[in-house]
Amino acid sequence: MRTGQAERPLLLELWLCAGLAATVCCGLLWLWRMWRSSSPLPTTLCAPLGSPADLFAACDMSKQKAVDLTKLGVGRAIAVLTSGGDAQGMNAAVRAAVRVGIYSGAKVFFVHEGYQGLVDGGDNIRPATWESVSMMLQLGGTVIGSARCQDFREREGRTKAAYNLVKLGITNLCVIGGDGSLTGANQFRTEWSDLLADLVKAGKISAEEAHRSSYLNIVGMVGSIDNDFCGTDMTIGTDSALHRIMEVVDAITTTAQSHQRTFVLEVMGRHCGYLALVTALSCGADWVFIPEMPPEEDWENHLCRRLAETRTRGSRLNVIIVAEGAIDRSGKPITSEQIKRLVVKRLGYDTRVTILGHVQRGGTPSAFDRILGSRMGVEAVMALLEATPDTPASVVSLSGNQAVRLPLMECVQVTKDVTRAMAEGRFEDAIKLRGRSFENNWNTYKMLAHVHPPESKQFNAETAFNIGIVNVGAPCSGMNAAVRSTVRIGLVQGHNMFAVYDGFEGLATGKIEPIKWTDVGGWTGKGGSMLGTKRVLPGSMMEDISVGISKFNIHALVIIGGFEAYTGALEMVAARERYEELCIPLVVIPATVSNNIPGSDFSIGADTALNTITTTCDRIKQSAAGTKRRVFIVETMGGYCGYLATMAGLASGADAAYIYEDHFTIHDLEVNVQHLVEKMKTTVKRGLILRNEKCNSNYTTDFIFSLYSEEGRGIFDCRKNVLGHMQQGGTPTPFDRNFGTKMGAKSVLWLTDKLRECYRHGRVFANTPDSACVLGMRKRALLFQPLADLKAQTDFEHRIPKDQWWLKLRPILKILAKYQISLDTTERASLEHIIHQRGKSH
């Protein structure tokens, strides 16, 4: 008996020791795994140690990042619907959501005709397949239909919708629409449990069915051409609407100049003036009326005086942009007809009104909207699959280049705050609540439009300086918009502006002339470079350049161009030790179709080139769809930078995009060929392959064409297209016009401060690193970064930045083309709060 009693504590002690040893081993194993993955230690380490089970659970935390996304949706069902007003790019979002949902193993359903289809059920809710979303990218509107649904506003309608979803096992809803549609989705989710209880009580569903569908996940994407939803930089459809508007404005401009007319253009925007504001910036309009900022009292006299001054300076036309929701300070509407009557009565000008209407909603979506819709669709499905019953309804938004998830109702609340601020007459607050992008656009417009052009006056070194503007490298669309705003803001600041013709060579040979306000009129819509541009670098003619700068007494330089502009500026900074005349502030504005300038996520001209490639690929795919079993190999520009090939691949639905940054082998080419062979067995009998011009010196366009032709013999035909210099031409897109305008304005304001800082004893002397910068867009802000700091980030041999944000989008391209690859989720979006963002932004 005593022996047994002695053995029990000993056995218990041995058991406890074994348990402790297992716990310690488990903890050490977990720490080793975390160290190997270089992941930050979770906050659970800071808490008191729990039970062995807690530690074993912690051991499995490192496995969460290794989740196989092709299995993440198994057993789940997702419904996709579009609601409210249609917007170009919705189809791209639908396509991405369907394909990523299928890729994850989930069942995906179309809901036709928006919430009405959800209420009516039956054939309105149909299974989606991979092929069913083919050839959707280039279509405007929404192919699954949209409708205003009164039934869904009533509880009875929402009960019917819940019944239809439960019967199909759908517990994940992806809604693409405006704030009204998304608010309705949130209400549906909030009531879900009560709706199921009513259905069980009525005997329409069983308790078991209710248990299986116990909660509903909602994720929204904002589709609205008005860009009126707070929390996202751009909504799906806005960029395409701007394309339609600018096409009309460009067409009207030519006829207005012929007849010396004044045109009043009314654009959409009942509650938001974004379209009107960006249009005014992009076309250099004389005046814009937006609901967020009504004109001051006595605006009628001010407007007429402005129009008369413009004509006096030699302009043959006037353009006035009006948002349909424009109001005066007392809240009364300002209509386009009212403005026409005013101009005719006061000035006697031949005035016409054009109301664009629904043409703004139509047409092919722009490359930006296709990429935005695709990215949002991928992120929305990921958010649905990662959601828990406690996750609030969220909306997938764009912040700079990042996809973010925001609480839906916070965004709706801030959007309502804008309306309240406008109703209470707090118009400055309304502008700020719209977000930093909207506020920057408004401030730039005010600087360019609400001023009297300065008269010629004697140079005053205390307040004014001589600033030269030069274009360097290959021409691209948007350069002229940057020159125009640089000149005009410089003149407003009181400086003397000088145009340098033909790049650095013109600076060396003295091709330098004063440039005035009227000289740059109408430049925003012109492609190429009005100043002329060359690729010649300044190194071999630095002495002549220093003489030219001295002769014309240039105090600062704005260099607009591509990689040659960047490297040329570096050479000038290095030569400051030898030539004192080069000790002046200078700023580089990235402008190149290649988008390869370190220090900036975007370059002026890249968006126009991307749209040119995308439009061409649409036509090529259409040709392939007509002939069947055809694969096109398309070569794009970009030097060693694969931006154009990758983004055009996303926008046009390419099967592959070969670039220098993403190394590929003959095995990869074989896999792509086999992929196309399998694709030809489906209903989609066409293929599109993009190749960056310098992706590989051996695997040339001709080689890839020959390889595909040989391997596809008897299965598909091959054709090749080299797009060439058409990518550098064309009318600049609204993005490039607006981007160039803001970049030019910001560069002059920075130079003004820098010049006053460097002006000592009657002369300008600047030789510090921060006196020579690249102005670039990083994430969400325009930043000035010293050239010296960017050298370490540059691969000079291949003329590209060492780190490029868009490379993270390449897996999306491959997944949407049906390749079985892993999606890197280490930087996946997490739920943020718009209230906090507003605090940081303002």
Image (tube, helix red, strand yellow):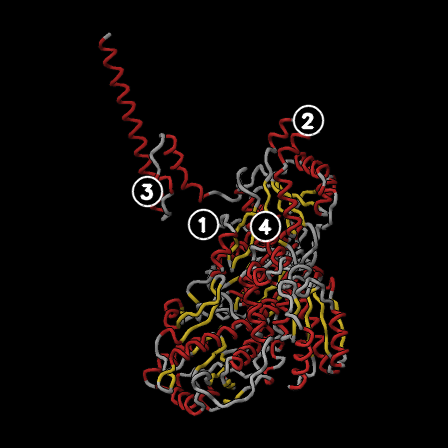
Amino acid type, mark 3: Trp
Q: Residue at x 59, y 33 (%)?
A: 214
| Residue 455, numbered circle | none
Labels 4 & 1 near each other (Cβ < 8 A): no
Sequence-wise first label, 1 or 2 = 2
Labels 4 & 2 near each other (Cβ < 8 A): no
Quote the CA–CA distance across marks 4 and 2.
35 Å
- Residue at mark 4: 413
Task: Indicate which label's residue lies in the foreground, 3 or 4.
Answer: 4
- Residue at mark 1: 826
Task: Indicate which label's residue lies in the foreground, 2 or 3.
Answer: 2
Q: Position of residue 489 (x, y in %)?
A: 53, 78
Quote the CA–CA distance across marks 4 and 1.
31 Å
Amino acid type, mark 1: Thr
The foreground one among 831 and 530 is 831
Task: Indicate which label's residue lies in the foreground, 4 or 1.
Answer: 4
Horizontally, residue 703 falls left or right of residue 89, namely left
Q: Secondary structure at mark 1?
A: loop
The foreground one among 134 and 828 is 828
- Residue 738, quarter of the rendered image: bottom right
- Residue at mark 2: 201
Amino acid type, mark 4: Gln
437 over 385 or under it: above or below: below
Q: Position of residue 769 (x, y in %)?
A: 36, 74
| Residue 32, numbered circle | 3
Q: Secondary structure at mark 3?
A: helix
Say if residue 650 shows up in the picture: no
Q: Residues within 10 Å of mark 3 (few under 14, many from 20)?
A: few
Sequence-wise first label, 4 or 1 = 4
Say if residue 399 shows up in the picture: yes
Labels 1 & 2 near each other (Cβ < 8 A): no
